[in-house]
Image (cartoon, helix red, strand yellow):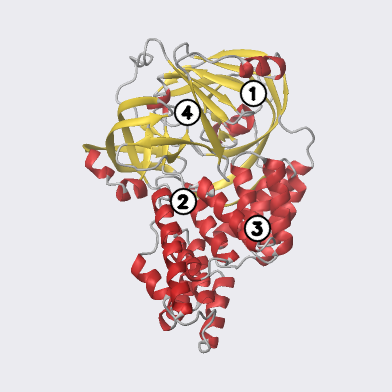
Amino acid sequence: MFFLLATGYCFIIRLMEFDEMKKKSRLPVVVASVLLAAVCVAGVRTASASGGKERDRAERALKEGEFAEAEKLYRELVVKDARDEQARLGLGLALLKQRKNQDAFDQAARVIATDPTSARAHALLGASLLGAGDFRLSVEEFRTALSFREDDAMAVAGLAMIDFYENRLGASLAGLRRAAYIDPNEPDYVFNLGQVAARYERYAEAANAYEQFLRVAPRTDEDRRARIRGLIDFLRYLGTQSNLLSVGGPNRVEIPFELTNNRPVIRVRVNGSKEELRFVIDTGAGMCVVSTKSAEKLGLKSVARGGLARAVGGVGRFEIVYGFLQSLHIGEARIERVPVYIREFYNAQEPVDGYIGLAVLGKFLATVDYGAGTMTLLREGEREREAASTPAPNAIEIPIRTTSSGFWSGEVNLDGVEKPANFIIDTGASISVVSAALASRAGLERFRQSGRINVYGAAGLAENIQMLLLPRIVLGSHTRQNVYAAVLDMDPINETAGFEQTGIVGGNVLRFYRATFDFGRGVIRLEPLAGGSPAADPKQKQPPVVTSQS
């Protein structure tokens, strides 16, 4: 009788906790009837006495990267014994590997309902929350896991990735080194270590981590392995170069730009040439990009290549080719030894030669003033003075995070979406975007427009794209009403982003602001233009929709 009373008391406490979690989390919590069935038993088994062979098969499938097969086998074990915690945790991990964050959350929550001290269940819960973009709750779960087991590698790695996304690179590197030491055979930890080391400009360590990944990772995804082999070659090349992205010139440089289809286009010079090239200012690209046509004209050769990448919108794949510029002149600003991608551009209606990405823009405090048609680049003392200055009364600052793939992501609010959504802030996209996944689950199709459009992206032309007219989009305390957005498949971005991106804030929104990208403080400052949006280019008729070359 005492045991049943105690069990009932624990159930009430856990149900209260999960009810509160449901209010705070975007992921649904396990229904009460399932929890009651799980806890109202005379004991809890961590593994079924039978099913040893099935368990071995499931574990082997998980290790070999056959995640769908592992999911199937673990589900069979759970059906046979709903109290088998190890099978349920295995199922949760298989789901997490497939980025089925909601289902992984459910499995971890069921284990916690019966075993609140399970470190691995809390870590799995944290990982699923982080994948869905809920940073605050994921931190709580990772810390809870470490309070029960201080060497839980999943929790250590999870907190390190949060440091990475929030631009605390030193702490992230230390955390992922520890996670990879605790569990050197988990591919995700060494892969993430490679990403952080590369961002931290420790190219040799990054290449070593990626080589370790190829040794321990399953061989099921040859495309990904080819991409990583090409990346290793590129990192080895960068490791032989000194003073990458070295900046020179005045501490304050102002460059005029032409606003073409909501995208700011500046003129630059490459490798000492006197010829000016047209480059898009692109905060939606991690590295700079040069068109294959311009690369041929400049005599720019590839220094490494390997694998194919998928473009946003799901329009196809494009080859990954790496190049290297000896110098890039933006007005009087000079950046030396610049890594770039070399890629074919498909939009012949608006020809450009390249894109200036965050690797270069991040060396400055960069302001894109859509009203004045100028970009200002500040460094050293000028940068510090501007960053410390008092913003205009109507300006707002939006904290930003950096995805694993190098995009800047901020939180926005949309009608019909309960929680803030993570959107990439992208000056290189002519229009805003809503992911097909968000549009479906939030019922945003009710805002669809009758016409369809074509969209140019990194892999070519996507045709017959649905458009939405969003009643409003809220950035901090600023609201933009009646915003057009294309509905695109963002799975290619989310495969490498680390946490879910559900849209893009493009030029049709940003053009109403003076936007300052403060990479040192990790914020974007938006100051509304006094006269509203700049006038449209009268020469341009029915411009094509373009996403950045990220």
Q: CA distance from mark 2 to mark 4?
A: 25 Å
Name the side, left or right, on which 213 lies relative to 255.
right
Q: Who's the residue at 73% across and 49% down the image?
A: 174
In the image, what residue type sits under mark 1? Phe
- Residue for point 37% across, 70% down: 34
**Disc 4 marks which residue?**
427
Local crowd at mark 4 within 10 Å, few (<14), some, or many (≥20)? many
**Rendering coords of residue 446 (x, y %):** 22, 42
Q: Amino acid at mark 4?
A: Thr
Question: For the residues carrying marks 1 and 3, which lies nearer the camera in this image?
Answer: 3
Disc 1: CA contacts within 10 A as few (<14), some (14-19) or many (>=20): many
Whichever of labels 1 and 3 marks the residue nearer the N terminus, that label is: 3
Q: Earlier in the sequence, mark 2 or mark 4?
A: 2
Indicate which disc residue 364 carries. Answer: 1
Q: What SS does tag 3 mark?
A: helix
Query: Disc 3 designates what residue?
Result: 189
Distance between the Cα atoms at labels 1 and 2?
A: 31 Å
Q: Do we see residue 547 in this rendering?
A: no
